[in-house]
């Protein structure tokens, strides 16, 4: 199980590193969410980004919020698979989302980076919990609190 987690986490990190070199302006942004994402009890991410003095922090906040929203949609889709294969998919997606958040926090202000680190850790904790058993249904309350802290840090930056 540890080997699987290592391989999945490593693959997710490699994908994030590969994608970090891509120009996000080269493709049009999708403004609509999928129907499965709309029905999901996913964490709420505010879409408003307060103007900040630091353009790197503003960019990081926008990218992290998009990552969290995209990850929530993918988690919802993976949960529909059902245990035990679904739990592996959910665990891998939490790890991938975690890697995306931490990768986009690079260059942000210290406050935003600290808040992003909390989000990343909670995502990895959820990944670990889904790996523990086929019947796992861990609470996302700590993640929701961490996302709220990230939104607050982004608004104050």
Image (spheres, rainbow, N blue to C red):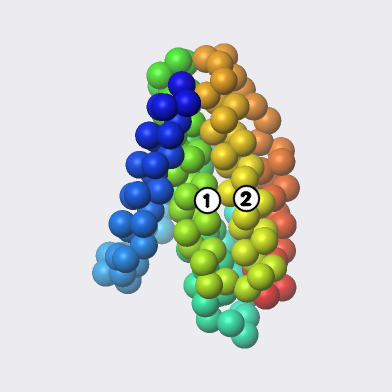
Whether pointer 2 and pointer 1 mark residues with C-beta atoms closer than 8 Å, the reply is yes
Task: State the residue position of label 2.
Answer: 119
Which corner quadrant holds the C terminus? bottom right
Label 2: which secondary element: helix
On screen, residue 84 above or below 19:
above
Q: Where residue 89 sits: x, y (%)?
A: 42, 29
Above or below, 92 relative to 100: above
Q: Does 21 appear above or below 93?
A: below
**Badge nearest the viewer, 2 or 1:** 2
Q: Nearer the viewer, residue 21 or 47?
A: 21
Q: In terms of image quadrants, where is residue 34?
A: top left
Q: Residue at x 52, y 67 (%)?
A: 106
Neighbour tally class for label 2: few under 14, some 14-19, many 20 plus, Cα within 10 Å: many
> Circle 1 is placed at which residue position?
68
Q: Is residue 5 left or right of residue 117?
A: left
Q: Residue furthest bottom?
A: 53
Q: Residues within 10 Å of mark 1 (few under 14, many from 20)?
A: many
Tell me what residue is drawn at x 58 percent, y 49 percent: 120
The disc, 2 or 1, on the residue closer to the chain's N-terminal end is 1
Say which quarter of the image contains residue 128: top right
């Amino acid at each position: 199980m540890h080997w699987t987690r290592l391989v999945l986490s490593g693959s997710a990190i490699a994908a994030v590193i590969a994608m970090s070199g891509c120009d996000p302006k080269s493709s049009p942004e999708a403004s609509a969410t999928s129907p499965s994402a709309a029905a999901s009890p996913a964490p709420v991410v505010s879409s408003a980004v307060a103007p900040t003095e630091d353009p790197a922090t503003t960019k990081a906040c926008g990218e992290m919020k998009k990552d969290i929203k995209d990850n929530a949609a993918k988690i919802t889709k993976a949960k529909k698979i059902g245990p035990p294969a679904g739990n592996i998919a959910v665990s891998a997606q939490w790890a991938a989302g975690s890697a995306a958040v931490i990768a986009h926090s690079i260059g942000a202000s210290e406050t935003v980076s600290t808040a992003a680190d909390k989000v990343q850790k909670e995502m990895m904790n959820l990944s670990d919990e889904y790996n523990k058993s086929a019947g796992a249904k861990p609470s996302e309350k700590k993640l929701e609190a961490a996302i709220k802290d990230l939104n607050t840090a982004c608004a104050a930056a």
